Image (spheres, rainbow, N blue to C red):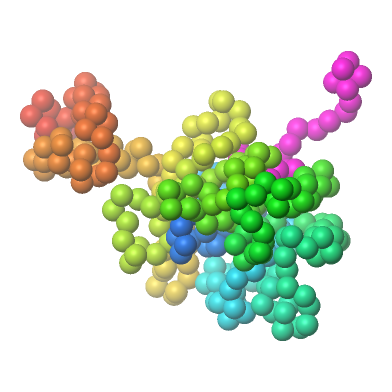
Amino acid sequence: TTSFIELPTTERRAFLFPWCKEDSINLISGWRGCGKTWFALGILDAVTKGESFGPWECGLSVPCLFLDGEMTVHDDKERIERLSLETDRQHPLYFYSDAYANQLGIPRAHLGNESWRQKMKSILTTRKIKLWVVDNLASLASGIDENAKKDWDPINQWLLELRFAGISSLMLHHVNKDGGQRGTSAREDNLDISIMLKAPHDYTPEDGARFICHFGKARVSTKDLNLIGDTEFKLTVDESGQYGWTYGNVKKEQRIEVLRALDDGMKQIEVAEALGISKGQVSKIRSKAVKDGHLSTKNKLTQ
C-alpha cells in the first residue's frame, strides 16, 4: 500500500466546478420535454468557451462532443443556431447527428453494439474529446432490458474504459412514473454525479425548458456542497430570437415567495399549499424572518 500511495497522481480538475470533472461518469434524468437536451448543450457550450454555466465556474476548457440519437437534422440545426453554438470558442464543440450519419449510410449508433462502441471511442480519442454527451439512453440503447443489470454491464464497462482513457461521459435519460431514473439501479453504481431535473411546483407547459436541478448523487467535497444546492433554470429568448439561461437558488426564491405571500395576508397553511411545501417549512421561514427583523409579528414586511 505504501508504494501505491506514493504513485505520482494529479488532482482531477473540474470542467464546471465542483461537479463536472475529468475522468467522470455522469447522468442527467428528467421527464420528457423538460429541457434535458438544451441543458446539456448549455453545459458543453460553456465548457468549450471556458465560461461559467449557472452557478458553476469553468475550471478547465476542453474539446467536447454532443451525440444526438433522437432528433432530426433540421431540429439539430435549429438548436445549434438558437444557442449560437457555431460561434468561436476556446476548444471545438463537435456534433454527431445519428440522423445525418444514417443518411450517409453509416450504421445507427447503439451503445449495446460492441463494434460501434469501439468506433466511437476511436472518434473521441482521435478528436481529443474530454467530455461528451449521450442523448439519450432510450434511443441509443434500445432493445436492451432496462431493468436487467447484465444487459447494462457491457455498456458500463465501456464507460469505465472511457474514464480510464481520460474521457468524461454525461448521459441523458428519462424518468419513470415515480420520478426516479428509469431502469436498473446498477446504472448508478459507477456514477460520480446523478442529477434529476424536477418540475417546479407552479410549472406549466407554456414555461418550456424550466426545471429545478437536483443532485441525487454527488462525489464532491463536503465544503463544496453549498454549490450544488437545488437551482432553478429557465431557458429564455431575447428580442433577436437567441436563447439564454437564467437561474436562481431555490431556497432563496422560496423564502422570498413565502414572505411575499404572508405580507399579502395569506395564512401559513394557504402559503404551504400554494407553494407545494410543508406548513413546517413556512413556519420555519416565518420565524427566522421575524427574528431577523424582516417580518413583523403581524406578518407584514418591514423596511
Task: Judge from the rendering whether residue 51 lies leftward or rightward of residue 237; answer left or right.
Answer: right
Q: Is residue 108 above or below residue 188?
A: below
Measuring 53% from the left and 45% from the top, which residue is drawn there?
A: 195
- The boundaries of the magenta stretch are 1-27
Residue 16 is inside the magenta segment: yes
User: As rendered, which of 195 and 31 lies closer to the eye?
Assistant: 31
> Which residue is found at the position 78% from the left and 63% from the top?
113
Count how many numbered circles sit on residues in the image: 0
The quarter of the displayed image where residue 57 is located: top right
Query: In x, y percent, where is residue 188?
Result: 62, 42
Res 138 seen here: yes
Image-quadrant location for residue 259: top left
Give 145 or 7, whichever is nearer the viewer: 145
Position of residue 229 in the picture relative to residue 71 (left or right): left
Q: Write the residue at 64% across / 56% down.
A: 145
Q: Where does the image place residue 115, in percent across and percent down from the top left?
A: 84, 64
Say whether residue 257 is magenta: no
Residue pictured at 58% horizontal, 81% vertical: 74
Q: In the picture, which quadrant includes the C terminus? A: top left
Quarter of the view holding residue 91: bottom right
Name of the residue lying farthest toward the top:
2
- Left or right side of 51 for 125: right
Residue 26 in percent (x, y) is at 64, 46
Residue 176 or residue 283, whichever sits in front: 176
In x, y percent, where is residue 110?
72, 65
